[in-house]
């Protein structure tokens, strides 16, 4: 059962007359989640569920799937023909003139663009202004419970320990002059996750030298690089506790296989770290001042630092992403590059901050996670790396 009172209050808070949730054969997974419908239970006919800011919700379901929304409160209208479907949409909208749907103007944010253009046209034909439900989706899709926050802290502690294990593995093999390849480190990290009750959807990124300059590099056995003394190494590792409600820790750190770090690596790292810290500071200041802030603005803060240093063309991805039970969640992202992220950062949500500079010879990324507590306090997890790790000196 949905929390109708909370949904209706949120509809009012975000300035809508109502929220029109629509699905056809599971194409709108966001609507299914909000309404508590498992994806494997999505029907074969269209349904609409209209939640007004005030009053009783309205259901529109097909005659042969009349029970599709019976678990939800509200009044039911049944349609059969396409003509009665259109009449039904008009009926359930009533006097509403400003409704939210899973729509993004000009598809500026594909994470929330789940309703087809024709359905939006149909609703607009009834003199209804369709707006993006993006902030509503962030509110209901990405907020963590207190238990999930504690699960994240547990995952963060273990994930940071996995980095220490990986660095030591590299140091031990290099000192012993034993061959060690990128996939060897991957394999050991995956074993560690399993041993510690964690799970992940894919192995971590282990990138050596030029491979670290590819933001989504994925080592392949037989074609991966050997890790040797004098190499620059990037590790991007993500996992969550393998328990109901588990949420991810997603971190990136960099090291150099030597006793001291050459200036070329440290110079780029310092720029990336400054960009990372600028984004965190902007978000923290906004919440401390009780000012709303969009994810795109936090992206801008990091990008300005890197552009001012002359490396803007080498920062080729967004600054961060929403984090939840999926590594890349559907809540607000830290992005004004790949998408026009106008959604607000909300309390009880988590996101990564991970600016990077990717050169042909090597790439640097520094990633931490930021959780916004219900009272607006920001917590940074993952440990703020302050310099490139000299692997053979510190391990």
Image (tube, grey):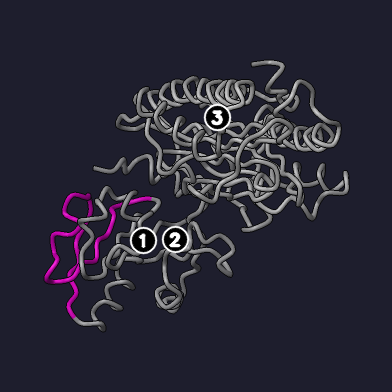
For marks 2 and 3 on the same chain, the one whose residue lies earlier in the sequence: 2
How much space separates mark 1 and mark 3, taking CA atoms? 27 Å
Q: Position of residue 48 (x, y in %)?
A: 30, 64
Q: What residue did someone put label 3 on?
A: 371
Tell me: 54 left or right of 43: right
Q: Quadrant of residue 107?
A: bottom right
Q: Nearer the viewer, mark 2 or mark 3?
A: 3
Whether 147 is among the magenta residues is: no
Q: Position of residue 150 (x, y in %)?
A: 43, 21
How much space separates mark 2 and mark 3, taking CA atoms? 25 Å
Residue 102 got which mark? 2
Q: Nearer the viewer, mark 1 or mark 2?
A: 1
Q: Is residue 232 visible?
A: yes
Q: Is residue 12 visible?
A: no
How much space separates mark 1 and mark 2, taking CA atoms? 8 Å
The residue segment tinted magenta is 54-80
Q: Secondary structure at mark 2?
A: loop
Q: Position of residue 67 (x, y in %)?
A: 13, 59
Image position of 101 with respect to 45: above or below: above
Tell me: 148 left or right of 166: left
Q: Secondary structure at mark 1?
A: loop
The furthest residue to the front: 177
- In front of the other: 77 or 335: 335
- In front of the other: 284 or 239: 239
Q: What residue did someone put label 1 on?
A: 28
**10 Å crowding of disc 2: few (<14), some (14-19), many (20+):** many
Which residue lies at the image location 30% right of the left edge and 32% below the top edge? 244
Residue 199 got which mark? none
**10 Å crowding of disc 3: few (<14), some (14-19), many (20+):** many
For marks 1 and 2 on the same chain, the one whose residue lies earlier in the sequence: 1
């Amino acid at each position: 059962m949905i929390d109708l009172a909370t949904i209706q209050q949120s509809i009012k808070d975000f300035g809508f007359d109502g929220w029109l949730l629509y699905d056809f054969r599971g194409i709108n997974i966001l609507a299914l989640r909000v309404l508590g419908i498992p994806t494997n239970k999505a029907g074969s006919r269209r349904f609409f569920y209209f939640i007004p800011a005030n009053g009783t919700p309205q259901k529109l379901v097909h005659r042969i799937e009349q029970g599709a929304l019976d678990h939800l409160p509200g009044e039911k209208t049944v349609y059969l023909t396409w003509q009665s479907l259109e009449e039904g949409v008009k009926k359930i909208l009533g006097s509403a003139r400003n409704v939210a749907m899973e729509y993004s103007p000009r598809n500026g944010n594909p994470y929330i663009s789940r309703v087809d253009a024709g359905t939006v046209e149909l609703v607009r034909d009834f003199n209804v202004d369709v707006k993006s439900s993006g902030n509503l989706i962030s509110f209901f899709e990405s907020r963590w419970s207190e238990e999930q926050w504690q699960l994240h802290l547990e995952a963060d502690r273990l994930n940071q320990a996995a980095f220490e294990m990986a660095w030591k593995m590299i140091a031990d093999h290099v000192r012993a002059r034993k061959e060690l390849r990128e996939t060897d480190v991957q394999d050991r990290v995956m074993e560690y996750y399993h041993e510690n009750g964690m799970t992940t959807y894919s192995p971590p990124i282990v990138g050596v030298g030029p491979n670290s300059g590819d933001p989504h590099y994925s080592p392949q056995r037989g074609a991966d690089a050997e890790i040797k003394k004098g190499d620059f190494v990037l590790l991007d590792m993500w996992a969550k506790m393998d328990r109901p409600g588990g949420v991810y820790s997603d971190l990136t750190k960099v090291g150099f296989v030597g006793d001291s770090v050459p200036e070329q690596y440290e110079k780029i790292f310092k720029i990336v770290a400054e960009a990372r810290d600028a984004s965190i500071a902007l978000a923290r200041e906004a919440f401390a001042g009780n000012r709303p802030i969009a994810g795109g603005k936090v992206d801008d803060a990091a990008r300005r630092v890197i552009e001012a240093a002359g490396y803007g063309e080498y920062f080729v991805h967004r600054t961060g992403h929403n984090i939840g039970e999926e590594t890349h969640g559907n809540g607000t992202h830290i992005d004004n590059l790949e998408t026009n992220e106008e959604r607000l950062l909300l309390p009880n949500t988590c996101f990564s901050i991970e600016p990077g500079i990717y050169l042909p010879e090597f790439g640097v990324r520094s990633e931490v996670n930021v959780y916004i507590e219900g009272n607006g306090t920001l917590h940074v997890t993952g440990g703020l790396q302050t310099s490139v790790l000299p692997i053979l000196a510190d391990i």
